[in-house]
Image: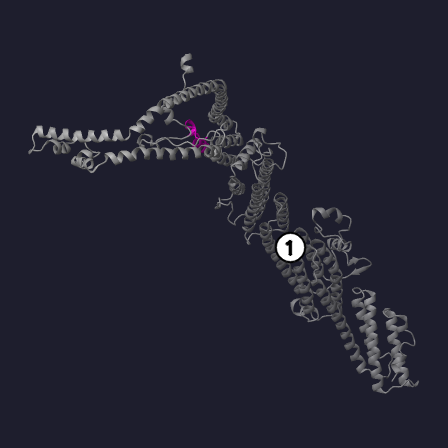
Amino acid sequence: MDNIQDESWTIYKASQYLPAVLSDPNKGKQTNFFTRTWGDAFVEKTIIEKSPFLPEITYAHFDQYLRKYGKRTKRHQRLSQLSNDEIIQPSTSSWETPYSQNKLNLIPLIYMQNEFNLNDPKIFSQVFENKSKSEHDVQDELSFYLDIVEEQIAKQVSQKSGAFFHAMTSHDTIMEQMGTASNEVRVLRSKVQRMDKCLTSDALKLMALARSKTNHKTLVNKLKLMATVLQTQPTLQLLLSSSDYVGALELIAGTQEVLAKELAGVTSLRHLPSQLKEMSKLIDKMLSTEFERYAAADLHRPLNSDEGVLEQERLVSLAAGLLRQNHLQFLEVYRLEAVTAAQALLKQLMIEQLADADDELNELTGSGEVAPTMDSAHWLKVLKSGSEALVKLMHRVRAVHDVVKETADVTCGLRENTIISPSSAEHFLSQDDHVQVTKKLKVLLTSVCDYCNERLAALVSTQSDNNTVTAHQVADLAKIVEEFTNACEEISGKQSAALKAAFKIQAGNYVHKFNMQRKNKLALLLDAERWKSADVPTEIQLLIDKMAMGDVIKSLPGSPCEQEMSTKHSSKPLPALKVGSQNYVTVGAVLILIRLVSEYCVCAYDLQLLSPVIGRNLIELLRTFNSRSCQLVLGAGALRTAGLKTITSTNLALASRSLQLVLWIIPHIRNNFQSLSGDNFNGFDSVERDIGHHIQQLEAKVLSIMNTLLGDQLSDWEAKPPVPSKHFRNISRHLTKLHEAVSSVLPEEQISDIYQEIHKNFKTRIREQILRMNIQSNGGPQHGIVTTEVIFYLQTMKMLKVLPAKCVSDNAMEDIWDR
């Protein structure tokens, strides 16, 4: 064994096993090993790096040696050439004769060729197969040629004898030097071998052992890593059984990275990357399928369960896994499932309501809509139940939205982990992906809320125009719409206009019907009105009192909320409306108008979304009342519609007082509507102007009638006995009848204004009559008659108490004599 270890290594001991060459991991799979051509290129050339222990030899290291021995070499070569010339020159002159040269020419050239070989048949036939010569002749010829050659050799030897002797003399010296050099080389080699054994071999063995140890450690680590990698699939199954999808995906990603970097080229693991890739695809499919099942289970469970988020840990695991794979399509899947759930809810509610109503099954569409044959009560009940169910559904969607949002925040590192397992809580979501997830979650909420709004809007729009909808039902519908839109805005942070638009259309139809019904009713009442004073019911007085206090009219007297207030007033009808310190005697049509106006106010309160439209309709109603009453009274249309014989001063006074009441109501109505919608309702200004102008026309009509009556009496009057004359008694009677007609209707101030205007016109007409009759204030008989007639007129005015004291004093009529 020691002999084997001490045996020196030579190049002939270099060997390499064929399996080692074929299995070299650094060269990969060798496919052309057995087809390569043998030669220096059979084995790939390996670049050997420079040894750090050997110095770099350059031309400068030999410079000194060349300078020292170069001159000696040149001198030695020159001396050797001179000695050879001296030895050869004499022999050439003595031995080389033309005769010797001719002898050499006698030898055939075939014997001088380098290719001369008797084994060649051609050459053998040329030498021996000569028919003209016998064997003896050939032998003699060859002997002759041999003699010539030997002779020439002897000559050459004699010529070079000096060089031979010189070589022999120096041979011993050279051999001695070579022996000495050989011994020195042998000693040097032995020293080098001992030095190699003592200093180099052990150190190289240590280095080789250290390198081998490092390689073994690396190999062990690789083997451990391979053992760990081989445990990937069982670990994956364990993680998937516990629904830790993020951990499974992280394990796959880490294993793939190790295989690509640390274990690249390991033949036994060459199929593992593809297996892991297939496993990742399988997990993707599992995540998608599980999330679809979860969405269906969460959205289709009973609505009365208050469990919040269904299986929150499962949802967090699924959401984190899908976010880890950057598969954001699951939000769209959840949105579609929510839409399907909303459709199923509405359809089920429709079926239940139709079953409760014992109605035949109407044709239901896939969106849960119903044919417009359902009565208003069941239709409203479906809307209420549907809105409540959809709000609960949207709250479920919002709960899932919050969980997914929190999961995205945790996986992006924006929030501390409180929901994901620590083993899976790696921050794998980038900021850009987080922004995209946030946007998609916002779209999820808004799209679901918008769809629910659209479905309820479609349900609202299905109500047929032929079905009667009461004000209370419309108010309930407005409440349902308001609560649902507020809930949607709270959940999604965005207003959806679909349901409100559908409600506006439906409520607009109701408001249009409401307005047309009341306009028609008012028109019929005005046509049938005989323009006589009417008793005031208690409920009308309550309405006026509420308007006077500035309260928003929320309900009409007679409703449950008004029963307590109505008990405070007498149920006996009143002769006039009491507004503050004034009493308004009015006609029945105006009392009905007050109730209609209150109905408009209540409708506007119930339908605040359409209060501007209702306000404009009310303005149109008041304008219609004013114009129609003008046609009936001033235009004498009541003679035809109500069968009146004539339009009396009482009718005119009642119309004027009624319009004054309407004029008082308008500012309170405007404040009521402004508190509901905030619009200015400038249309009330034009109605006030029209009604004021109408009142002035009525007063002018009364004055015109009185001026005509008084003017007719004065034009026929003559200043002659008896006194008072018939004409002045008629004037007194007309004044008294007018007072009787208006005193119970108009306020004293307005009556006084009317009589002052009559008094002014009377003085103007009597002055004209006096001038026509040329009666002068001279104390004559005619002057006395006129004075007596005037005193009788003043006494009538004093009796009526309609003029100020200065107008009925003794000197009040003195200006009639002015010319």
Q: Residue 584: x percent and y percent?
A: 78, 61
Q: Residue 198: x percent and y percent?
A: 49, 17
Q: Residues within 10 Å of mark 1 (few under 14, many from 20)?
A: many
Magenta residues, dominant SS class? helix
Query: Is residue 15 visible to the viewer in this orientation of the structure?
Result: no
Residue in the picture at 80% in, 82% down = 715
Q: Nearer the viewer, residue 600 or 125?
A: 125
Determine which quarter of the picture holds residue 13.
top left
Was residue 778 drawn as part of the magenta stretch in this picture? no
Q: Which residues are magenta?
A: 264-279
Amino acid carrying label 1: it is Leu
Query: Is residue 798 visible to the viewer in this orientation of the structure?
Result: yes
Is 363 placed left or right of 149 in the picture?
right
Q: Residue 674: x percent and y percent?
A: 71, 56
Is 498 placed left or right of 744 in the picture?
left
Q: Residue 533: x percent and y percent?
A: 74, 62
Residue in the picture at 72% in, 52% down = 553
Is 115 placed left or right of 780 in the picture?
left
How many numbered circles are shown? 1
Was residue 265 drawn as part of the magenta stretch in this picture? yes
Secondary structure of the residue carrying tag 1 is helix
Q: Which residue position holds label 1?
A: 610
Query: On the rendered image, what quadrant is the C terminus found in?
Result: bottom right
Query: On the rendered image, what quadrant is the N terminus found in?
Result: top left
Residue in the picture at 84% in, 85% down = 771
Q: Is residue 401 above or below residue 375?
A: above
Q: Nearer the viewer, residue 583 or 598?
A: 598
Is 760 placed left or right of 171 in the picture?
right
Q: Nearer the viewer, residue 365 or 408?
A: 408
Determine which quarter of the picture holds residue 118.
top left
Residue in the picture at 38% in, 35% down = 78
Residue at the extreme top of the image, as rendered: 1
